[in-house]
Image (tube, rainbow, N blue to C red):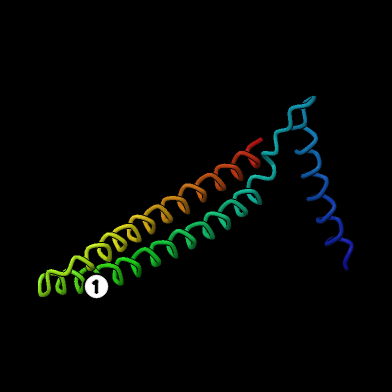
Amino acid sequence: MTEKHVTDKHVHIAGANKEIAANLQGDKKNFTPLTQGAGQAVQSIAQSIAIAVQDSVDTMRSMATVQSATIGVATQKYIETRDHDYIPITEHCKGNLNNSVEYWERVGLTGASILKSYKEIFQK
């Protein structure tokens, strides 16, 4: 390493330490010098949460496709035969559709809660 490189590195570290020390006031800690790193962490977490929400939407869409097709077949069979055994099938499928929507909501709300927690940690 050259002397200039080490000097630049030390200046950078000293500057960061000075900023951190300036932002520590009693028990209150203000980590504003870490904003860039914190922002990157929150962004990474937000992207992971967005992927989880997208996956839950894919699950909901897949469930809707299967359940709708099943409801269609059960309805057709009921119309043809007037056999009441097909009615519980449609009700069960409707319940599955509702469950997939509730799953999507749970993933979204949990993700939002996690993201909010991380933002609060880094904004202290």
Q: Position of residue 121 (x, y in %)?
A: 65, 41
Q: Nearer the viewer, residue 34 or 110?
A: 110
Q: What is the crowding at mark 1: few (fewer than 14 residues within 10 Å), some, or many (at least 20)?
A: few
Q: Residue furthest top?
A: 26
**Residue 88 position (above or below residue 39):** below
**Residue 76 position (above or below residue 25):** below
Q: Nearer the viewer, residue 27 or 52?
A: 52
Seen at 23% across and 67% down, the residue is 85
Seen at 31% across and 61% down, the residue is 92
Q: Secondary structure at mark 1?
A: helix
Q: Quadrant of residue 79?
A: bottom left
Q: Position of residue 42 (x, y in %)?
A: 58, 51
**Residue 123 position (above or below residue 52):** above
Three-letter amino acid code at the position of disc 1: Ala
Q: Quadrant of residue 8?
A: bottom right
Q: Nearer the viewer, residue 30 or 104?
A: 104
Residue linked to disc 1: 69
Apparent side of residue 18 relative to residue 121 in the rendered image (left or right): right
Q: Position of residue 18 (x, y in %)?
A: 80, 38
Which part of the image, by quadrant, shows the N terminus? bottom right
Which part of the image, by quadrant, shows the C terminus? top right
